[in-house]
Image (cartoon, rainbow, N blue to C red):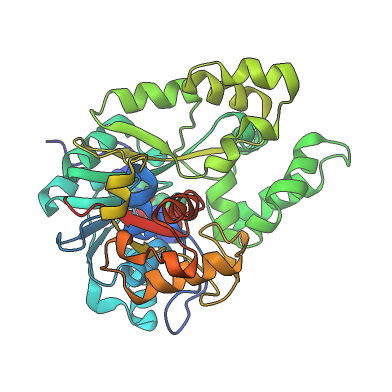
Amino acid sequence: MTTADSATPRVRDFYNRFPYPPDPLQDGPPPGYNWRWCYATAYSHCTGRAPDPHQPLRILDAGCGSGVSSDYLAHLNPAAQVTALDISPQALAVAQERLRRSGGEQRIRFHCVSLLEAPSLGRFQLINSVGVLHHMGDPAAGLGALAMALAEGGILHLFLYGDGGRWEIHRTQHALRLLGIQVDGTGVQFARQLIARLPEHNRIRQRHQQRWALDTVNDAAFADMYLHPQETSYTLERLFQLVEGCGLEFLGFSNPRSWQLDALLQGEALERARALPDRQQWQLVEALDTDISHFEFFLGKPPLPAHTWSSDEDLWAATAQLNPCLWGWPGSRLLGPDLEPVDLDQEDVSLLKAIDEAPSQPLRHLADPAGGRSEQGLGEQVRALWRRRLVLLRPTIH
Ligand SMILES: C[S@@+](CC[C@H](N)C(=O)[O-])C[C@H]1O[C@@H](n2cnc3c(N)ncnc32)[C@H](O)[C@@H]1O
């Protein structure tokens, strides 16, 4: 196997100078959660069911940068052994210090290697690789290596740039290259001034102000956006070509709300759109939503289950647990996995309490006809909580 990517030397230099993300270091665990980095919640999103809690769990953060995602992975998955790798020693040094200060360093091992070497580090049930493959000379080879390192039944979370919503970034990058602007602190100041001094009605200047100015206050973030030496971005069509070559299964977007047709269409247009195959529905969203600047999604290595919990027998025999990615429990006003407000009625609060107190009880035992909770009613209530991602369900037989 090749262990060097053509872009590695210049990409390593870039991130040694500008470790990313530039988030400040903090003492103690990272705030809140990101459900994509919580294995139980992510696995349930992909398959409909919670994973087997007795299975040893290995997680890889491939291209961990300054370690923000690694920190969440270590804290949101306390039973896991986490491995993080990156080609930039400077980014890794920040990541190591971040984990030391957060108290997560015992749960993680760092490696200064290319993700092309991931298969030599073993097999992983969850691989996270956010914002990395599109900085390789050969992203398909990178994806192939991650696919090889994924355990059977494992899931891979990827984030790749999308073409449509980055036109202003690509034009600015091109202009800066034509001007021979260097990739260093001076270059960053030059580029900031160039954008700020474009005519007031120039659409690049406007888009920068509206969409990116806040994200690029920090110089490393600005450089990552406008001065990167190696970047590929995708249309959906090219994305699926990439995915089809790697032997993994597409399990869905990890930001499904961005792909909702009813946020864009109404009436007959919506009806016609809903009759299309999934991929064409997404292409329609890509065509109509000019803000789609990235694709984030899960791939899986078969065999993977797909639970819909339509059978009452399966449901009553299942066990349930509260989604670990909730904020405000116990209570009736929560924040959900995407930090969206969730209001619970008294019946839901009482069922969630029962689940929380006896997570290993088959659901059938939570029926309480005397208290007004029949088996039938329980089934519908649990399905609704599962659809709202407030509970995860696990079959009794794995
Ligand atoms: C945009 S940063 C993303 C960091 C982190 N994944 C995040 O999203 O917070 C990209 C990171 O990928 C790393 N990288 C690029 N090519 C790589 C490769 N072939 N192998 C491992 N890491 C790589 C870079 O050094 C950099 O730290």
Question: Which residue appears farthest toward the right when viewing the image?
Answer: 200
Q: Is residue 249 above or below residue 394?
A: above
Q: Is residue 12 visible?
A: no
Query: Whole-percent x and y of residue 327?
Result: 53, 71
Answer with the quarter of the image where residue 261 lies.
top right
Query: Whole-percent x and y of residue 76?
Result: 36, 68
Answer with the quarter of the image where residue 272 lies.
top right
Q: Residue at x 56, y 30 (%)?
A: 163
Q: Residue at x 58, y 65 (%)?
A: 335
| Residue nearest the viewer, comparing 347 with 4 | 347
Query: Whole-percent x and y of residue 10?
Result: 38, 45
Q: Is residue 137 above or below residue 219?
A: above
| Residue nearest the viewer, comparing 185 with 343 | 343
Residue 281 lies left or right of residue 217; in this view the side is left
Query: Whole-percent x and y of residue 182?
Result: 55, 47
Q: Quadrant of the N terminus?
A: top left
